[in-house]
Image (cartoon, rainbow, N blue to C red):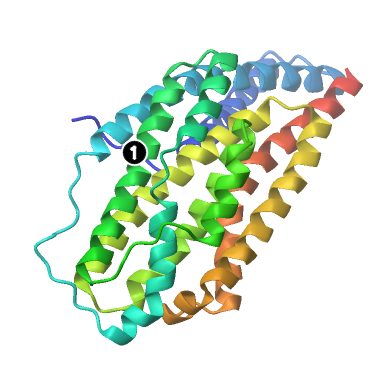
Amino acid sequence: MIPLQKPGAIIVIFRKASLFLLRKLTDIFKTYRAKKVKISLKNKIRCIYFVFQSTFQKLKPFIMSSSKRWIEHFTVNATQQRIDWSLKPGITQQQVGIIIRSLQAWQLGETSDGSHLIHASTIYSKRIGDADYVDAVSLFIREEQKHGNNLGRYIDAIGQSRIKQNWGDTLFRKVRYFNTSMEIWTLAVITVESTAQIFYQALKDATDCSLLKQICSDILIDEAYHIDFQTERLAIIFGSKSFMGKMFMRNMYTLFFFSTSLVVWFAHKKLFCAGGINFKKYLRKMKFKYMKTINRATLIQIKTNAVFHVISKII
């Protein structure tokens, strides 16, 4: 069996690249010190610059193999069965009244056919020469649809009806209908998946229903990998931009992330509060998720670009 892809893989890769860089520089300077050769400051900087270049060239094979690794992960994960459907829903009518509107809205959002995302990923994959990426996205969408089916099955089991329209879902569908940018898609998915992690944890804690808890746990396990899948892609897309482009888009990412987070809070604050999450706690959690996703995917590249820019001016 192929092992599951571990969350945070791209961060591990960047750490390994940084360690390789430090070891390489240390070896070079030790060699010169052993030979008692003096190196001018300018030559030291030139050496650092070229080692930087060779180090980040080593990330290219990882980027191109990324899609294959995610196909392997999603294929294996599709075989995992974490829900015991023989359990009966153990939820009170009062609890149903608290969670049902939000549960219906998220169930609807999880059932998209993903055709617009497939279209955007097809255009993007042709541009970068990575045909496997479309297959990885297709499997990602299939996993999201599994969540929608499981939530729908639970709604049916508690005697409630599924909805076919919701203002939040309608707004999101209108935006994605005209969107063919993989960058915007990736940013949107990271943001929504980050709020989803908090939402499903709150939903899990809002009742004592064992079946609902299992459904939420299954989704939360999948979402951790989904966020890493999208964060990895955002880092790759972000890396192709100029230094000024990175500075501008990082600010746009941040604005989009937190403004969308506020919309989700006001739409589902009743359920969040039922799960023990007040507004202050919600914002703290979203800030933490921002630091683990968008901040990690962008800040290291901006700092690296700044170093390259300074060094290139010197040499």
- Considering every residue shown, the one lying at the far right of the view is 313
Say whether residue 13 is left or right of residue 110: right
Viewer-side residue, 260 vs 19: 260
Q: In the shown orientation, is residue 70 left or right of residue 232? A: left
Q: Which residue lies furthest to the bottom in this view?
A: 94
Name the residue carrying label 1: 142
In which quadrant of the rendered view does residue 289 lie? bottom right
Residue 109, can we see it? yes
Q: Is residue 308 above or below residue 246?
A: above
The quadrant of the image that shows the N terminus is: top left
| Residue type beneath disc 1 | Arg
Residue 168 image-quadrant placement: bottom right
Q: In this view, does 85 lie to the left or right of 274?
A: left
Q: Nearer the viewer, residue 310 or 110?
A: 110
Q: Which residue lies furthest to the left in this view?
A: 86
Residue at horizontal 80%, vertical 31%?
243
Q: Residue at x 59, y 72 (%)?
A: 266
Q: Position of residue 291 (x, y in %)?
A: 61, 54
Q: Is residue 219 above or below residue 250?
A: below
Q: Quadrant of the C terminus?
A: top right
Neighbor class of circle 1 (other Cα within 10 Å; few <14, some 14-19, many 20+) is some
**Left or right of residue 241: residue 191:** left
Residue 220, percent across and down? 36, 56
